[in-house]
């Protein structure tokens, strides 16, 4: 009994110390602006339950202020095989069973939102493939064959009651849906999944939203955008239900330049959020310890600031004595102000961007001992006002030491005029803007590896070239 008392006391002490430390951290985060009656709040959820995990407090407070609230679900969450087995207590590989799971999760969303004060007519289900929307964004535009879902094994939205029933699994379908919803609803505030979320559907929804908003920027008033984070390594911590603790940003994002804000929840709002999370029985039977860890004293939002690049002329052009690729970038290393810097994390350097001589230049700092084991994965998606986004290149580059491959969507392309230079301190990649479709606006992501798990990883950054 004494031993048990010691363990219990020790656990309580740890939680108390953690609550004191994290409380002071949370106090430094700015609060989002209070909702007003004139607000039109749009919540974009990659899967049923994300809107509750990230925004149950938002929904309640917006409703109390008299604001309009609408929720859009990108997928019906039909690709979670393990949850299906636990919830249904049987093993199956039939495609109809996974569509059934999507219908179950749809109804759970309806039930959860009813608890929070939203009727079913305020919910829009798009029904696109769970665990497939990032692949669609990267590879399925102007596609003769749509994306095929891994478990449901269908190529179009199969849910008869969903907004997009019958729509093929291609990028144009999702983008057109979002644009129409935004044009019709004209939101003042949009809450969406985070660009640094490790879940692929969460990344994809942020990307589709940013492309939609950029394309509509002359047709609607600019809404405020609040990304909410759900999936990040070893976060939130501790797991399980801790209503006494705040929800703080992951430590990995300490030096990430993300501008965080929060929404404080009252005890009654927190209690209702807890009940709404538990209404997702198909998910909580497997991962209640994780989902309930978001039912805390506040909800958290944040995004990277936009990077604005001014076109520059390289030292090679300014001084004819500088010739050759390596010489050109030696000059860049000396001119520390040449790049707009985006921190990755304090332990593993930084990634930075520049627009030089009609090229996008990406510099990634690295540890000196990393050489042959050092590699990058880079995504660049550009938007040009003179072209449809569907026709723009969707660039994926993978480097290994000083070699690299380049894909545009599914197609491997000749890396003509793309240059890579590695030194002990950094790796610099130079890509002609023509290869990127001469974009005015880009979404770019860089992940760096060194023979271990990811050393450094950025979420998608918004880059504007002036």
Image (cartoon, rainbow, N blue to C red):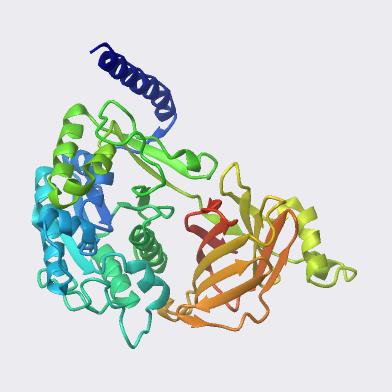
Residue with the most extreme top position: 2
Q: Nearer the viewer, residue 328 or 187?
A: 328
Q: Position of residue 402 (x, y in %)?
A: 69, 68
Question: Which residue: 25% across, 43% down?
Answer: 291
Question: How many numbered circles does the render carry?
Answer: 0
Q: Compared with residue 22, is residue 105 higher up or lower down, i.e. above or below?
A: below
Question: Which residue: 27% across, 30% down?
Answer: 242
Q: Is residue 437 visible?
A: no
Q: Nearer the viewer, residue 307 or 49?
A: 49
Q: Which quadrant holds residue 414? A: bottom right
Q: Compared with residue 112, is residue 379 higher up or lower down, i.e. above or below?
A: below
Q: Position of residue 449 (x, y in %)?
A: 57, 57
Question: Which residue: 24% across, 57% down?
Answer: 47
Q: Is the C terminus in the top left, top right, bottom left or bottom right quadrant?
A: bottom right
Residue with the most extreme bottom position: 144
Left or right, 18 with reference to 88: right
Q: Which quadrant holds residue 60? A: top left
Q: Position of residue 111 (x, y in %)?
A: 9, 50
Q: Is residue 43 visible?
A: yes
Q: Compared with residue 269, is residue 385 higher up or lower down, i.e. above or below?
A: below
Q: Position of residue 338 (x, y in %)?
A: 71, 56
Left or right, 350 with reference to 74: right
Q: Is the N terminus in the top left, top right, bottom left or bottom right quadrant?
A: top left
Q: Which quadrant holds residue 464? A: bottom right
Left or right, 264 with reference to 431: left
């Amino acid at each position: 009994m004494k031993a048990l008392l010691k363990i219990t006391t020790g656990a309580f002490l740890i939680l108390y110390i953690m609550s004191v430390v994290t409380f002071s951290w949370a106090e430094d985060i700015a609060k989002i602006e209070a909702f007003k009656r004139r607000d039109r709040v749009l919540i974009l959820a990659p899967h049923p339950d994300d809107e509750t995990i990230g925004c149950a407090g938002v929904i309640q407070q917006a409703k109390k202020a008299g604001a309009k609230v609408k929720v859009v679900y990108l997928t019906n969450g039909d690709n979670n095989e393990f949850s299906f087995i636990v919830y249904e207590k049987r093993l199956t590989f039939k495609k109809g069973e996974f569509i059934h799971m999507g219908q179950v999760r749809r109804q759970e969303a309806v039930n959860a939102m009813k608890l929070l004060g939203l009727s079913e007519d305020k919910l829009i289900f798009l029904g696109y493939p769970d665990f497939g929307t990032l692949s669609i964004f990267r590879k399925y535009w102007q596609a003769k064959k749509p994306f095929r879902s891994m478990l449901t094994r269908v190529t179009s939205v199969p849910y008869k009651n969903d907004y997009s029933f019958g729509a093929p699994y291609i990028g144009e379908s999702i983008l057109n849906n979002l644009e129409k919803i935004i044009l019709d609803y004209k939101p003042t505030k949009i809450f969406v999944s985070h660009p640094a979320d490790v879940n692929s559907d969460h990344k994809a929804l942020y990307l589709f939203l940013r492309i939609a908003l950029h394309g509509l920027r002359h047709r609607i008033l600019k809404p405020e955008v609040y990304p909410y984070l759900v999936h990040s390594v070893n976060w939130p911590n501790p797991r399980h239900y801790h209503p006494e603790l705040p929800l703080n940003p992951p430590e990995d994002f300490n030096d990430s330049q993300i501008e965080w804000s929060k929404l404080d929840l009252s005890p009654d709002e927190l209690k209702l959020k807890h009940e709404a999370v538990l209404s997702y029985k198909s998910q909580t039977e497997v991962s209640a310890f994780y989902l309930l860890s978001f039912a805390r004293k506040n909800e958290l939002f944040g995004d990277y600031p936009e990077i604005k690049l001014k076109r520059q002329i390289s030292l090679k052009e300014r001084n004819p004595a500088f010739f050759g690729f390596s010489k050109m970038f030696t000059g860049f290393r000396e001119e520390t102000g040449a790049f707009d810097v985006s921190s990755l994390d304090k332990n593993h350097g930084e990634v930075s961007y520049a627009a030089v001589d009609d090229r996008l230049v990406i510099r990634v700092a690295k540890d000196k001992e990393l050489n042959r084991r050092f590699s990058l994965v880079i995504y660049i998606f550009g938007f040009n006002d003179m072209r449809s986004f569907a026709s723009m290149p969707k660039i994926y580059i993978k480097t290994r030491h000083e070699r690299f491959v380049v894909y545009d969507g599914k197609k491997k392309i000749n890396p003509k005029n793309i240059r890579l230079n590695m030194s002990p301190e950094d790796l610099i990649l130079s890509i002609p803007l023509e290869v990127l479709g001469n974009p005015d606006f880009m979404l770019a992501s860089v992940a760096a590896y060194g023979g271990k798990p990811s050393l450094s990883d950025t979420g998608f950054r918004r880059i504007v070239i002036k």
